[in-house]
Amino acid sequence: DMAQGFQPPAPVPLRHIALGCRFQAAMSDDEMPDTMGGMGLPDGMGDDDMSDDGEDYKPLEELPEGVKKEIVKEAPEGNFKKPKAGDDVTVHYVGTLESDGTEFDSSRSRNKPFTFSLGQGSVIKGWDIGVATMKQGEIAKFTLAPEFAYGEAGSEPKIPPNATLIFEVELISWVSKDDLFQDGGVIKFEIKEGSGWKKPKDSDEVMVSLKAVAMDGSIIEERAKLEYTIGSGVFGPLSKAVDKALVGMKKGEEAKLQCTKDYAYGDQRPEGATLELTLEQIFETKDVSFAKDRSVMKKQVTEGDGWDTPKDNATCTLKVTAATDGSAPLAGFSEKVLEFTAGNGDVCDALEMAVSEMKKGEGATVTCTKPELCVEEKLGLKTISAKKVVFTLELVDFAKGKDTWSLSEEEKVQFGLERKEVGSNLFRKGRIPLALERYKKVIDLFSYIDNFKEENKKAAKDLKKVCELNRAACQLKLKDFVGAKTSCNNALKEETECVKALFRRAQADFGLKNFMDTIRDVKRVIELDPQNKEARALYKEAMAGQKEEDQKSKGLFAKMCAGLGKGPIPEPGKDNTRDPDDDDMDDEEGEEEEEAEAGEDGEGAAAKSAEATSAAA
């Protein structure tokens, strides 16, 4: 029934946008760049809270000329998403003529909401454009010019030709719908929205629940809370559809996938199937080893609180509930809650590495492929014969302590001295990777000291130089010759005649087979310290290494010269490429084998030089 004498509500202060810009109705908030969510702003503080003049002005989306929008009632706080093309939206609406206010249609008078597929042309153009700008719970009034309504023809008898229409629309809800492969083979419906912002990637580990339902409603298969690696193919013929859906889901999201036979069970079930999929958990797997060599991998099982992780010198409470070889418990292990200071070497290296990247309350499994890093007497693990160790951990608590950026100059220098001493103690105990990390952190602490007072600046520079030298000693032990050379160069910027820096750079060059550079630095060391026995020994080794390299070069050059003028002279334009089976190639292979053997000898010499570094440190 049409309401007689209907008058539209008094207009609120207009917030119209009527610009001649193309509206991208096919894009939802989900697909827009997340410019606010990751910035730590208070809840609800987004674009709508910002204006140029401080008044309560809330800018709307750009709409084409001919579509005007007034917000009658704002969406509830926290509702920021908008539907996108293809979603099934449910609305209430009242339609009136602008000319006289006559009501020509209303879902409210029928007490039955209207559902349609957005952006598919199933309703008038102005609806597809306007509803796409709305949030759940919002009520808006749209004024639509004829070209966005029923045009020149109208819709007699209720809507005359060339009529401008006014619709008051309430967006009740929508079901997010996506064509995952753009071929109609898998249609995804979002049943329950997930939480957070993380989405898994290919090869990530997740926990999922899956139920496959036939068209007659019978259950084909069901798996609850299964740990699954995306891309592993564990779900057989369903894997392609499941993997595609998962990489677009958040933790806790529930979805329904309508699959044709090509993405389900093939000709076995030609009618296809419906998959009910829940992403229970996303397991974040991270390389926490100091060397980033994947020797210690942490898999987050339960999320922790906030963002903070224990820093150097933080007091930690860590619960270790299991230690296995991947299947069976390790002999002697006993569950225990450990209290220790992070970075001091109070616990084994593997636990130090893991806890430095855990949040309070986080649960994780840590897989270590270097069992020597897991020896921990407090856990009953005095010796380990297994090839790998898997710890189950929970960081119960940690005392954050004072952030280094908030320390005064004097406090920074004192803190740096204390942490350097911790590193030196670890070095003496053979805890080289852990000592290396301590020196790195002290160096980083003094990355910018230009504004320090002179006495503090000098103390900071001296401390930084010592830590660069000690870091080089650690790197030589770990055979990181490039890193050691860089550390020595940094120290030499502060003191160009530093004997330790010159000697350790010579050791690094020797490890890299840069014998001439080694000889140059060692000569300078002997000039500065004539009694340095280690330098004299390294000088002899470097001379021997260079002599061997010269002999190889001489032999190779002689062979090249001997080959000149041999063989028939090729006719002009003919290919003169040597036969790959020539005897000379066999000789070159022999030379390569000799070079490989010489390389092994060179590594041994570098190792001896690195041993000398322990005494020098």
Image (tube, rainbow, N blue to C red):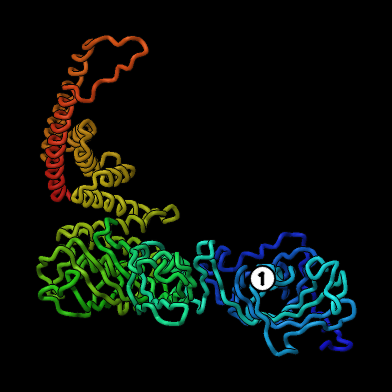
Residue 447 picture quarter: bottom left
Compared with 397, 202 (above or below) is above
Q: Is residue 252 visible?
A: no
Q: Compare residues 468 and 252 and report the one nearer the observer.
A: 252
Q: How many marks?
A: 1
Quadrant assignment, res 154? bottom right
- Residue 129, visible in the rendered structure: yes
Callout 1 crowding tier (Cα within 10 Å): few <14, some 14–19, many ≥20 = many
**Depth check, front residue: 553 or 239:** 239
In this rendering, the answer to whether 155 lies above or below 543 is below
Answer left or right for 355 relative to 557.
right
Image point 15% across, 41% down: which residue?
A: 603
Q: Position of residue 244 (x, y in %)?
A: 45, 65
Residue beneath the point at 89% across and 77% down:
99
Q: Point out residue 480 in the picture as x, y percentages from the top left corner.
A: 24, 47
Quick one: 274 or 599, which is closer to the camera? Answer: 274
| Secondary structure under the numbered disc 1 in the rendered image | loop
Indicate whether 423 appears above or below 493. Answer: below
Quarter of the picture containing the N terminus is: bottom right
Q: Residue at x 33, y 75 (%)?
A: 226
Residue 460, position in %: x, y? Answer: 34, 55
Residue topped by disc 1: 132
| Residue drawn at (13%, 49%) of the image | 615
Q: Quick check: 543 above or below 383?
A: above
Question: Could you tell me residue 579's position as x and y percent?
Answer: 24, 22
Q: Nearer the viewer, residue 201 or 242?
A: 242
Amino acid of disc 1:
Ala
